[in-house]
Image: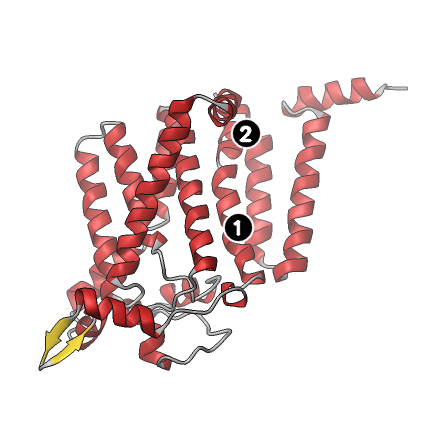
Amino acid sequence: MRTTSTVASKTKKETGVSAKAALVVTAISAGYLLLSYVLIGFKPEQLLLVALFNSLYYLSPVTRKFALGYTIFMVFWILFDYMKAFPNYWFNEVHIKDLYEAEKAFFGVMYDGVALTPNEYWLRHPNTALDILSGVFYLCWVPVPMGFAAFLFFKNRQQFIYFSLTFLLVNIMGFVVYYLYPAAPPWYIQQYGFDFIAHTPGNMAGLARFDAFFGIDLFRGMYAKGSNVFAAMPSLHSAYPLIVFYYGLKNRLKWVNVVFGVIMGGIWFAAVYSSHHYVLDVLFGVVCAATGIGLFNWAMARKGTVYRAVQRFIKAIE
């Protein structure tokens, strides 16, 4: 009769993974699927996430380290997804008119003797070239950080972890603000006025013109999966490219940083042009990113408990 240690040894020899580690991964995968089903119902993306992680985890030592490193981004996605179970308007009043008036007061544009928000100005002056560019830039908001993270994983594991944890920290900060200050996006007022309507579905707003031009349903599908439309302040769309740009400069990527800078400016403009965010949302997104970068750098400079935990994580994937 084979002992438990013999079975575990055989399992590790065949897959490179101990029986204990395999059991933990299986338990976490099953627990995630079960909790997701209870909180927000089953979605194919959940199964895809579990399948992708498990495939990478068991495929090879390199892909296992890649999967472990990317758990940071998986945590971000899971937190974002679970926000559907706890709408922020349950906890605080949604800011609609006051944010609109503040935007007009700080950044209002006079047109035909009437003060307009920048969103309202662009709504009256759409441009096909800008529609296309805005759609292209907005499509970069997740692929660029994910692709940059993959590049850092193979170039510098420490920078990969630093970038990933900064990204997660900025998102957590943004999520906290979403619950403290629920805010309607500009398109909401264009569609519904100043009255609060719970369970409002996501909307493509100005990005619908991109879909219409190419005859596709790309953004329609993306915004149908949104967690909460009352999460406009701060604009995390605007925060992400700043984190990428910062770490691009830190890693001295030369001309690539020019590309990152263009994408950053393009996303900031597209956020306002497409009526998904106010200028104020964009500015607070920038502040959120800068604050997250500063806090993470401060934690690393102190070389305390957080620093030591991060260093252990880095060693685990090297």
Q: Secondary structure at mark 2?
A: helix
Residue drawn at 37 percent across, 27 percent down:
159
Residue 57, position as x, y percentages in the image: 58, 33
Instruction: Tell me the CA gap for discs 2 and 1.
Output: 23 Å
Q: Secondary structure at mark 1?
A: helix
The residue singled out by tag 1 in the image is 79
Q: Amino acid at mark 1?
A: Leu
Q: In the picture, residue 192 is in which quadrant?
A: bottom left
Does the rendering let one see residue 73? yes
Residue 92, position as x, y percentages in the image: 49, 65
Of residues 253 and 235, the one nearer the viewer is 235
Does the rendering let one see residue 212? no
Q: Residues within 10 Å of mark 2 (few under 14, many from 20)?
A: many
Outermost residue toward the left in this view: 112
Q: Amino acid at mark 2?
A: Arg
Task: Verify CB contact (< 8 Å) between mark 2 and mark 1.
Answer: no
Question: Which image quadrant: the N terminus?
Answer: top right
Q: In the picture, residue 257 is in which quadrant?
A: top left
Residue drawn at 52 percent across, 43 percent down:
75
The earlier-in-sequence mark between 2 and 1 is 2
Q: In the picture, residue 58 is in which quadrant?
A: top right
Residue drawn at 24 percent across, 67 percent down:
103
Q: Residues within 10 Å of mark 1 (few under 14, many from 20)?
A: some
The residue singled out by tag 2 in the image is 64
Residue drawn at 66 percent across, 36 percent down:
25
